[in-house]
Amino acid sequence: MNTEPLLSSASVVEFENVICYFQMAGADPKWQKDAADQNFDYMFKLLIIGNSSVGKTSFLFRYADDSFTSAFVSTVGIDFKVKTVFRHDKRVKLQIWDTAGQERYRTITTAYYRGAMGFILMYDITNEESFNSVQDWVTQIKTYSWDNAQVILVGNKCDMEDDRVVSYERGKMLAEQLGVEFFETSAKENINVKAVFERLVDIICDKMSDSLDTDPTLMSGGAKGQRLTDAPQGPQATNCNC
């Protein structure tokens, strides 16, 4: 049996460009325009992580497209959406990556942790294993991301109260132990989805403001169009602005 990773670290840049190409080619004109739009004050790279089937893709589609489907299709590798929001009189472009939860894709997905400004760490309130895996995901963040990355813990599928196995109190207690904020959400019923993203952006902005107060030279070149991401470096094979 071949146990080699699907992609080496050196192949991640090429993989990213391929994703960008097909996403841009297959997207509707409105999404293409938003993805290519360079008129923004900041761009934040966000990742949604957690075990497989906790609802990461549905969560992203609810936020980006205000759509939901009950059909489960496992994410292959990594996917993304782009959404522009206004926070604190600033136009913020969000580059939101939806990662696969399966172990076999871990080499690909952890390569994208680098430069991420924020993480939505998700578990399923009806799945004890997904909750028990939260600490492992936190370790992944600490290992592969930068020190200032902000995290929000999310207990998804709160509409399925009859099937709940993880109480709100347990989720809240874990978040307090980890030193992060906590939300329970439902992509299906559109509960707290927008609130999670808005809060994560606010936390990043607050952290960025604190950093600028400490070292104003960080923005010596001006804020306009500042990309607060650290994407993998490599040859630009396409004109994709993601």
Image: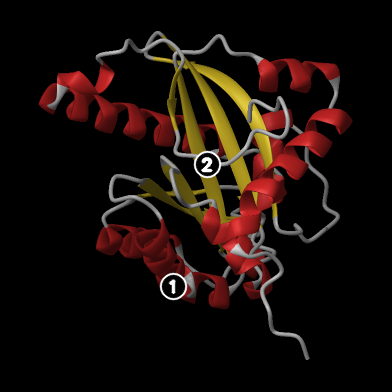
Q: Quadrant of the C terminus?
A: top right
The disc labelled 1 sits on which kind of residue? Asp
Q: Is residue 6 left or right of residue 47?
A: right
Residue 119 in percent (x, y) is at 46, 48
Q: Residue at x 75, y 43 (%)?
A: 19
The residue that disc 1 covers is: 136
The disc labelled 2 sits on which kind of residue? Gln
Q: Nearer the viewer, mark 2 or mark 1?
A: 2
| Distance (Cα) linking label 2 and label 1 | 28 Å
Residue 59 in percent (x, y) is at 65, 45
Residue 81 appears in the rendering: yes
Viewer-proximal residue, 239 or 45? 239
Q: Residue furthest left?
A: 214
Q: Residue at x 39, y 49 (%)?
A: 151
Q: Is residue 219 left or right of residue 84?
A: left
Q: Residue furthest front?
A: 235
Tag 2: Cα neighbours inside 10 Å, few (<14), some, or many (≥20)?
Answer: few
The residue that disc 2 covers is: 233
SS assignment at label 1? helix
Determine the image quadrant of residue 189: top right
